[in-house]
Image (spheres, rainbow, N blue to C red):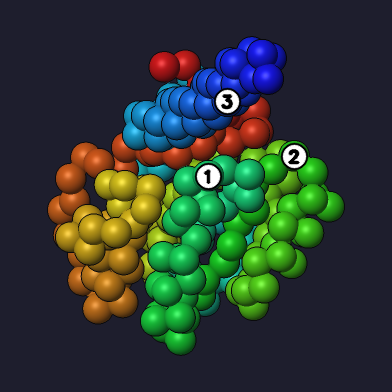
Amino acid sequence: MRFAPRAIVDSRIRLALAGAAVLACSTVIVAAFWIQDWRYSLPTPRPSGLRQAALGSTAELPPALASFAREDRPLFLHFYRPECPCSRFNLEHVRALERRHGGEASFVLVLEGDDQAELEQAYARLDWPIPHVVDEGGAIATALGVYSTPQAVIVDAAGRLAYRGNYNTTRYCTDQRSEFARLALEDVLEQRAVRELPREATLAYGCSLPSDLAEATP
């Protein structure tokens, strides 16, 4: 019996150490979440050699997109990088846009990444019957001045670059008042000029692209 107090003390020490370990792990997880959230709340650094055609100019579509362009409907390009958290958070919003307007506009998923086989596997896992292209070497993004995901590009039926920018002010796409891509698409479908949008609509947020274009400077 005389050893009972020592055993109790040892047990309490083990419990305290276990509790401290759990607290430390929880702190690290929470800190990592907030660091990531803060990181993606900042604008994506612009690449030093970035060239962007002016909105309203004729869109120079790469050959990989030529078959999707039609004279009777606009083209909606969604730039998606599977490993990007912002792209994953944004996906349901884009799905909803495609369900709502897929009969009026041609939606195409532009997959960004280094490994074509992995990108095709990622597309298969989406279980989403939307046309897609793999942007080899970032050629499509470079041609259209896109350097971040998720981003939207809308080309009107006349082949003009109508919109290039964000879906929302937040990566969760929960504020209907700032659903920029949706508002721009609705304007294009109504055959009117895209309304004037705030700077947040065209200041890219999210993940840099893995292509040479993503060699950015702050």
Position in image of residue 82 (x %, y %):
63, 50
Q: Disc 3 marks which residue? A: 15
> Which residue is pictured at 58% across the width and 36% down the height?
209
User: Mark 1 Cα within 10 Å, few/some/many (few <14, many 20+)?
Assistant: some
User: Mark 3 Cα within 10 Å, few/some/many (few <14, many 20+)?
Assistant: few
Q: Quadrant of the N terminus?
A: top right
User: Mark 2 Cα within 10 Å, few/some/many (few <14, many 20+)?
Assistant: some
Q: Disc 2 marks which residue? A: 114
Asked if one can make out residue 43 in the rendered structure from this viewpoint, the answer is no
Q: Name the amino acid type tagged 3.
A: Leu
Is there a contact, CB below 8 Å, between mark 1 and mark 2? no
Q: Quadrant of the C terminus?
A: top left
Q: Name the amino acid type tagged 2.
A: Asp
Which is closer to the viewer, label 1 or label 2? 1
Q: Quadrant of residue 142?
A: top right
Q: 154 left or right of 179?
A: right
Tell me if residue 167 comes above or below residue 40 in the rendering. below
Q: Residue furthest right?
A: 117
Q: Name the amino acid type tagged 1.
A: Pro
Q: Nearer the viewer, residue 177 or 85?
A: 85
* Marks 1/2: CA–CA distance: 17 Å
Q: Disc 1 marks which residue? A: 85
Mark 1 or mark 3, which is nearer the start of the sequence? 3
> Which residue is pictured at 41% across the width and 42% down the height?
53
Position in image of residue 85 (x %, y %):
53, 44
